Image (spheres, rainbow, N blue to C red):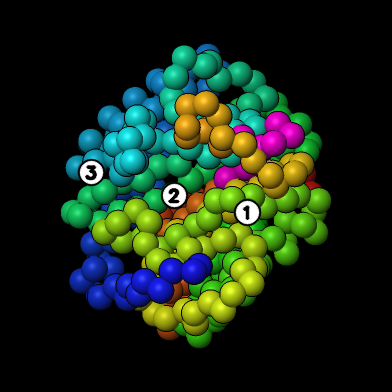
Amino acid sequence: MGKKSKIQIKSAADITKMRIAGEAASSVLQATAKFIEPGRTTKEVDEYAGELIAEAGGTPTFLGYRGFPGNICISMNEEVVHGIGGPRRIQPGDLVKIDVGVTKGGWIGDNAVTVPVGPITEEAKRLLVATEQSLFEAIDLAREGVRLADLCGSVEKFVKQHGFSVVRDLVGHGVGKELHEEPQVPNYRPMERTPLLKAGMVLAIEPMVNAGTGSVDWLDDGWTVVSRDRKPSSHFEHTVLVTDGDPELLTWRPRTALPAQLGVSL
């Protein structure tokens, strides 16, 4: 956390606009996930997502952000996040992480999913199941009056039970008109005091979970983050509205990594 910047509370009018941006981001993410298949290049996937974002009346949030060159982030296997589309061809057995941000009406929807290109290993199946479930463990705590640290800690607590590690060098974040707003949302319990959640806060909760060590390296492109031991990594993300009742997923989509869907149990 560290920073003393004020956490924004979105108004009812703000939230209405964020729902529109979130729905666009979710629809692009789902359609892009279906486009992924063996033989396609990661650049083709990136360009397809860019076309969908334009058709949805939005702009790619990530394109040009601090110089990022892609429409979306597309990260393969041991790549954790921030991968850039290029000539690499998708192969059977790959785990393809796509992270889509859409800016529409001045507001941002941010979401991510890991797409398995079958057949994948049993370990990879378990990794996906654990990562998606850890996201929902955290989402369930996105409620007014909950301490942010409890939400953050729930991710690591869950994945550690299943032999996996969270990435500590990268965090989720508040989101609204800016891609990265306060508060930071790590996937582990922070040591410093954290705020109580309040209705109207909007959080991008995004577990980044590795099969082996949680330590990471940055590749020479300055963007792509990889697991230090080069074992597979998984990433799922939703933009979540804190309310005085149940959390609202502004980027709702059907779940894709339930144990029954992947034919595996944790």
Secondary element at tag 1? loop
Residue 58, numbered label:
3
* Residue 208 appears left or right of 31: right
Q: Given the image, on which type of amino acid does mark 2 rest?
A: Asn
Residue on which the image places disc 2: 111
Name the foreground residue: 259 vs 214: 214
Asked if disc 3 and disc 1 are in contact, CB closer than 8 Å, the reply is no
Residue 168, numbered label:
1
Dividing the picture into quadrants, the one containing residue 76 is top right
* Residue 174 appears left or right of 218: left
- Using the rendered image of the protein, determine whether residue 35 is visible from the camera's viewpoint: no
Q: Given the image, on which type of amino acid does mark 3 rest?
A: Gly
* Residue 186 appears left or right of 67: right
Mark 3: give few (<14), some (14-19) or many (20+) Cα within 10 Å.
many
Q: Residue at x 29, y 36 (%)?
A: 64
Q: CA distance from mark 3 to mark 1?
A: 31 Å
Q: Residue at x 25, y 75 (%)?
A: 12
Q: CA distance from mark 3 to mark 2?
A: 15 Å
Asked if disc 1 and disc 2 are in contact, CB closer than 8 Å, the reply is no
Q: Residue at x 61, y 60 (%)?
A: 187
Residue 202 percent coordinates (x, y): 39, 67
